[in-house]
Image (cartoon, helix red, strand yellow):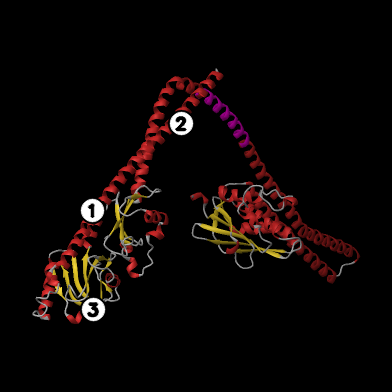
Amino acid sequence: MLKQVASIKRSFVITLTGAIVASFLFSCLVFYQQYQAKLNSIQDIQDDLIFRSHNLFNRELGSIRQLMKLLVADNALKSTTDNSDSVNLNQINSKVLQHFIDFGSATDLISQIRWLDASGQERFRVNFENNAYEVIPENELQNKKLRYYFQQGMLVKPPNIYTSVLDLNIENKVIVKPYQPTLRATYRTNSSDYYFDGLLVVNFNLSDLFKQFASHSEAKAQLFVLNSEGHWLLHQDKSKEWAFMFDAQTPSLAEESPKLWQHIASLPIEEIGHFAEHRVKSFIKMLMFDDNTSEVETNYVILLVKSIDEVLQNLFWHAIQTAGLTMLILVAIFGVYLWREYHFKLKLLSSAIELQQEQQALTVANQKLNKNLIQQQKLQEDLVEAQKLSSLGMMVAGIAHEMNTPVGGAVISTSNAQVICQKLQDQIQKGLTKQYLDESLVSINDNLYLSRLNLDKAVMHIKSFKRMAIDRASEQLVSCDMNKIVDDLFAVLHPRFKTSRVALNKHIETNCNLVSRPGIISQLLENLILNALEHGFNEGEVGQIDVRVFNLDLKTICITVSDNGMGINPDLRDKLFEPFVTSSRNHGHTGLGLSMVKQWATKILQGSVSIRQQEELPKGISTQFEIVLPINISVL
């Protein structure tokens, strides 16, 4: 049965894989067709915009050519033998100016008509703006001999007309604002046919033409206009327009896209081209006029049309979505067809196998978990008992050591008293004097007094041991004095510190009583103090361990255990309270002391324990543990 299922599954996988591959290939074809169709539609839109803009531009240039020919053909500018002697200079001036006014007022294209003499000095000038004209007085006329259009226009022989490049109108060396895209047409006059030798200059304001170009732009087809050097005359970013007029550092198209500019430069005049790498960029080079003798191939503008990036991205993702949807539909159809053949049997068998495997895995995991839990509980109980026995053994050893001195002193004093009594008895038989009796009584009294003092010390040690033994044997909540807990612990630890050069100091700054477990507190402090003694100092090294108790607030107290020993390895700080972490395993330490301290502080005493960071320690302190405990556990 398993072999049959494997065979069916293998056949299903192979068939489904083939269906997915076929669906993917078909969706790729759909993507290509969709994307190319959208690109072609955008290119058609761009070509239409170029065609319309091209016609509009040619229509404007054609009208400029006709206007210029009409202007120079009028007899008002020409000298004749009939009127050369009879007409004075004022009449000539009036006649010329009236012709300029009539001619310029007839169209909105003309912004200025001037007649310059052979030296470049303006002889007549009429400005036109908003259907009004202004005749410039003689004292305001300028000399334009340094302007490029005068120098180049003087070289073009009639009847040819010179046309300048497109730039901005400049008056008195200042660019006129708002910007006026201006095209200048000139005609060379001679003294034999006209009133004087010079140059007729007409400024054509193409602002309306550029506004129409800007209005034609849309997201799929944005129109840009450039001059023959690749500088922007019309751009969506206004800061780039006419930047070359201001010596600005704005890059030209040749600098922004060298490959595109190279392709445009190689394209013949008046031929629509498309950039091979980006089919959504269309362009055409438009010759301004073909009358110029020296600049037929250079005086042209470029109409560039392209789509914004978002349009291309939207087309791409729309094609991706269409192809993806197609693939999903095909895969779904194939999947449903194959699903009916094997799904239920395979699913049933697979579910049974998975259920059996999961049950087995859960059984094994449950057994391991129970075993580990039992071992952990037993280990914890053994560790607690071992710690209590170890602590109790140390307490017994300490009390036994401390009891030796007072008990020995009491024995000696009692023996001395017995000897004196025996001597007194012998003296009574021989003959007792009053002086000897008094001296014997004084000596007996002194020895009894010394015996009483030593026995009192022994009683004090026994009481201290009794309190600690009772506290540690009981985990009940009781009212206790923190000062008494520390004193009893210090008494038990005194033998350990008496043989070392490390001083144990206490600083109790609170008199409050706790409702807690004094035995656990004593064990916790004992572990921290002995840990500092054994790990912080080498044998015979001088140092000190300080235990400080103070109130944090009305509900908690803080206990700090500090030492000025060798400190803790930084690598161990972050895992110091984890089980079996120790730096002295070769000296018999198991690494469970601080782990039990954390368990006692957090779980039994319902507080917290932490070690302060090295940079936060007071001067002269290398290690400090901080325990925060509630004053009354019963109210938590």
The correct choice, above or below, for 320 with respect to 96 in the image is: above
Contact flag, marks 2 and 3 (Cβ < 8 Å): no
Q: Do the residues labelled 1 and 3 touch (CB within 8 Å)?
A: no
Instruction: Label the magenta part by its dominant secondary structure.
Output: helix
> Please, is residue 549 above or below residue 275 in the view?
below
- The mark found on residue 55 in the picture is 1
Q: Compare marks 1 and 2 and give the one earlier in the sequence.
A: 2
Q: Based on the displayed image, in which of its 4 quarters is residue 315 positioned? A: top left
Asked if residue 544 lies left or right of residue 217, the reply is right
Q: Is residue 474 above or below residue 239?
A: above
Q: Is mark 3 on a helix, strand or loop?
A: loop
Q: Position of residue 618 (x, y in %)?
A: 60, 66
Query: Above or below — where is 173 with respect to 440?
Result: below
The tally of labels here is 3
Bounds of the magenta segment: 351-372
Residue that label 2 marks: 21
**Which residue reaches farthest bottom?**
139
Distance Cα–Cα, label 2 vs label 3 = 80 Å
Q: Which disc is residue 121 wearing?
A: 3
The reply to whether residue 41 is visible in this rendering is yes
